[in-house]
Image: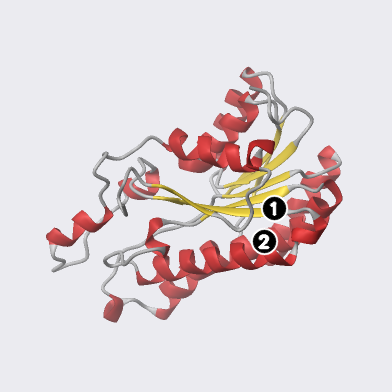
Amino acid sequence: MKRFDGKVALVTGAASGIGRATALRLAEEGATLFACDVQEDGLATLAEEVRALGAEIATRRCDQSDEAQVEDTVAACATRFGRIDVLCNVAGILRFDHTHELSLADWNRVIAVNLTGTFLFCRAALPHLIATRGNIVNLSSTAALAGQPWAAAYSASKGGVLALTRNLAIDYVEQGVRVNAVCPGEIKTPIMKAFRLPEGANFKLIDRVRSPSGAAHPSRVASVIAMLASDDGAHMTGAEVRVDGGMLS
C-alpha cells in the first residue's frame, strides 16, 4: 500500500518504540517524514532505515515540553517540505509511584511532556493541517480508560490527551481536519522496559496492566495509527481506538 504518497508526516517520539514503528510504517507507505525526539542517536538510526526504504526524512531534536522548540520544529518541517498532512503525537514518558510519594516536580514533568507537549504540537501544526485538510493521531493509553496502579500522573496526562482529542475533533471538523486517538495497552517498548515497582507495591495489581493476548510489538499500534491517518479513516474523528489485546474487554 502507498496510502501516503505525496504526504508529509511529522512524527514525535520517533527514535524508539511506537514512534519509531509509526515512522517506519508511514515511510513504507510512501510518506515523507519529519521525525523528532530527544534521543538524537535513535533519530540517526531511524533516518538510515527510512532512507533504505527509499523515503525522504529530516530529523530534529525536540523537547516537546518546551514551547519554543515545538514551534521551531513545526516551522522547520513546513519550511523543509512545504506542507504538513499528518501529525502523529507519540512522544511520552511514564513513571510509577505511590501517589502520596509523588513529587510535584515529577507530576509536572509527566504532564508537561505527555499532555502539554501534545497540545503544543497540535496548536503549532493546526494552521498547516487546515491548509492541507490533514489529520492528527494522538497517542493516549488504556491508562486513560481504567485505573492503572502507581501511575496517577501518567493516567491523568493520557486522560487529558483523550479529552483534548475529542475537543479538537469538534473544533476543527468544519475545516476538514480529523483528530483521533489510539489507546495502547502492554506494548513492548523501552518505556515499559524501564518499569520498576514502587517499594511495597502489591504485585497482584500488575495484572491490571497485562493483556490476555500478551505484550505486542509496537508495529501493531503503528498499523492502527497508519489506518487512522490515511484515507481509510476518512469517516473517523474524535475516536479512541484501543490496541490492547483484550485488556479492557
- Badge number at residue 178: 1
Contact flag, marks 2 and 1 (Cβ < 8 Å): yes
Q: Name which residue type carries label 2.
A: Ala
Q: Does residue 227 appear to the left or right of 146 in the view shown?
A: right
Q: Nearer the viewer, residue 195 or 179?
A: 179
Q: Which residue is mark 2?
A: 169
Q: Earlier in the sequence, mark 2 or mark 1?
A: 2
User: Can residue 1 be seen by looking at this rendering?
Assistant: yes
Q: Residue at x 81, y 58 (%)?
A: 175
Q: Nearer the viewer, residue 173 or 199?
A: 173
Query: Neighbour class for label 2 at 10 Å: few (<14), some, many (≥20)?
Result: many
Image-quadrant location for residue 126: bottom right
Q: Name which residue type carries label 1.
A: Arg
- Badge number at residue 153: none
126 shown above or below 246: below
The spot of residue 167 in percent (x, y) is: 64, 68
**Where is the N terminus found, in terms of image quarters?**
top right
User: Can residue 65 be seen by looking at this rendering?
Assistant: no
The spot of residue 24 in percent (x, y) is: 57, 30
Q: Nearer the viewer, residue 208 or 111?
A: 208
Q: Residue at x 36, y 49 (%)?
A: 185
Q: Secondary structure at mark 1?
A: strand
